[in-house]
Amino acid sequence: MGNKTIYPFTAIVSQEQMKTALILNVINPKIGGVLLRGEKGTGKSLTVRALANLLPDTEVVSDCAFHCDPTRQKDACDTCHTKIAKGEKLTITKRPVTVVELPVGATEDRLVGTIDIERAIKTGEKHFEPGILAQANRNLLYIDEVNLLDDHLVDVLLDAAAMGVNYVEREGVSFSHPSQFVLIGTMNPEEGELRPQLLDRFALSVEVKGIPYKEARAEIVRRRITFERDPVAFVAAQLNNQEQLRQKIISAIKILHDVILSDDLLNLITQICTDFAVDGHRADIAMYKTACTIAAYNGRIEVTEDDVKEAAELVLPHRRRRQPFEEPKMEQQQVNESVDKWNQNKQHPQQNDNSTIPEEPDQQEEPSKEQVFQADNPYAVKPLTTPIFDKIERHGSGRRSKTLSDSKRGHYVASMLPKGKVTDLAFDATLRAAAPFQKRRIEFCSDQQTALLIEGSDLREKIRETKMGNLIMFVVDASGSMAAEERMSATKGAVLSLLLDAYQRRDRVGLIAFRKNTAELILPPTNSVELAQKCLTKLPTGGRTPLAHGLRLGLDTVKRSIRAEDIPLLVLVSDGRANVNISGRGPIEEATCIAHEIASKGIHSITVDTERDFISFGLIKKISEAMGGKYLRLEELGAMPLVNVVRSNLIHSKNSPCNT
């Protein structure tokens, strides 16, 4: 009954590239999944659920928790293999393909499943509790907002998608089961990007945007209202179209293994990937599989040049990204140029080594009329960490601050008595706790074959330590005093370098600028470091210096935005020449009071002093001392100057009298 109320796939208006990418992965799950990037409200979730409803039912082993395929015994789970080995007949039933959703807050155990270690030690039985990857086998695994998922979970599910098998191991006890699914991820880039290494693991990517044409938008509204008024009649009107598309998909699956891609077209694939300078070879492989699947979808067993070009449009956009702040994109003109080069090489193979180097485009731009300074080039900053002294267990991921982990992720550093059911057994600590009592227990044990007797009081659970990102609030001075001697260009370069460091360490960032008579929250805390970079680039300079306003807004924003797992860090970048107050006190006095308040709230801080040595008043250093944080001069922020100082000191120490 529920299927009758699902919006039909064939009734979805436009978004042809998204629909094609999804269908191709259904025809050939070995392509490796699709990432749908784009705005909210563009029908991504609706399309995924409609696709599942479109697909034909599949044959499964009826009593199998992993929905094993009875026709592919080599991919069967251990239970089905055991039945086959004993000569038992597998009972077969049909069931519809379903959409299995992975929540953003899922734990690793919920994703991969768990092994009952306590039961394994006490009874010797290996008991596995299936997770989401077990449910997803031979289904669609849908991850909404995949960019907000912990990186280690993304790594796990992408590995399972690539291998088709989920491996779970706990304390030497292992279990595996088939996990072959169509991986579909969605994300809104404004809420943060995936790391390039993870982006590359998605075979296809589609940029999903709202339809700008009023006629198409009106048709979307019209169809949706008609569906809501009478879902049964609306679905019935699409039955013929749905069945035609279903049969087209079934036919494509049948002929996929017969599709041929010639060596010439393989050369075209490698030519395009080389011209686009993509890293590794995943793009080449994904383009090969996608082009073959496109041919099968169109009822052909030979791949054409157009198939390769269409595959390139799906495979390359998210792999063009070369630096953290570059926009992921793909120029169709460049694909056409690669095809033209390939055609020329076929016609004139002797000229292959005489390719001309294209002229670089003119990078000069007309000077801006506004007082907006360009940022200096980013550089590697010295390691910036925030020490954590509390005993709070946090759930998150990142690469900056050490904290106790509330999951099975992280380094095993100690053990403790379990508070409930043991989920992360400390095997060594359990043995140490049980060892002193073995002689007495064996004397009273009726089973003399037992080598080791473990009781509930012996069990110990692991304490793990992991690294996670910070909530970093940048408070940047954009007043007129920063314009002197190109100081703002250096300041923007420094903040850009810190943003690059935040990107690499998976921090959440926010940006506040203070100038004229007040401070402004340019960017609320977000995972999208790219947005912060864009806001910084456009930040104008001029006016007075309301330092107290900036600190107050920074403190209030951190208090309002902080989450249970957050480790807050306020980064103040200023010359400290405050000249705007909030109340009747002096500007420096007000800023100092707020700085003391920031320290009292347990907020870590770093102050970057942008004053020049020969005109320094030392005001910002006093503010830094009041915040109780780390103080750095602008020129000390870079990692290389620090390395040079260390090297010079080492050279000096070698030549010192103490070493002669």
Image (cartoon, rainbow, N blue to C red):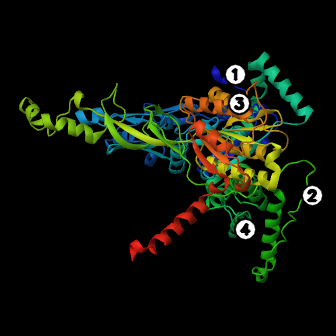
- Tell me the crowding category of disc 2: few under 14, some 14 to 19, or many 20 or more residues within 10 angstroms, Cα based: few
Amino acid type, mark 1: Thr
Q: Is residue 122 above or below residue 203?
A: above
Residue 403 locus on image (x, y percent): 46, 39
In the rendered structure, the answer to whether residue 649 lies left or right of residue 524 reads: left
Q: Which mark is residue 403?
A: none
> In whole angstroms, how far apart are the C-alphas of marks 2 and 4?
36 Å
Q: Please report whichever mark, 2 or 3, sits nearer to the chain's N-terminal start.
A: 2
In percent of width and height, residue 25 lies at 65, 46
Q: Are marks 1 and 3 in contact (CB under 8 Å)?
A: no
In what element is the residue under mark 3? helix
Q: Secondary structure at mark 2?
A: loop
Q: Identify the residue shown where x is 74% and y is 66%.
A: 275
Q: Is residue 445 visible?
A: yes
User: Closer to the camera: disc 1 or disc 3?
Assistant: 3
Decide: is 324 above or below 531.
below
Q: Quadrant of residue 355?
A: bottom right
Looking at the rendered structure, which numbered label has been put on residue 366?
Answer: 2
| Disc 1 versus disc 2: nearer the observer | 2
If you read the primary sequence from the N terminus, does the residue marked by circle 1 or circle 2 appear first?
1
* First reached walking from the N terminus: tag 2 or tag 4: 4
Tag in front: 4 or 1 = 4
Location of the C terminus by quadrant is: bottom left
152 and 614: which one is in front? 614
607 to 51, vertically: above or below:
below
What's the distance in space between the residues labelled 2 and 3, CA to CA? 35 Å
Q: Give the class, few, some or many, for how many residues have Cα within 10 Å of label 4's Cα (few <14, many ≥20).
A: some
The residue wearing badge 1 is 5
Foreground of the two, 480 or 417: 480
Q: 10 Å neighbourhood of mark 1: few (<14), some, or many (≥20)? A: some
Q: Which residue is mark 3?
A: 553
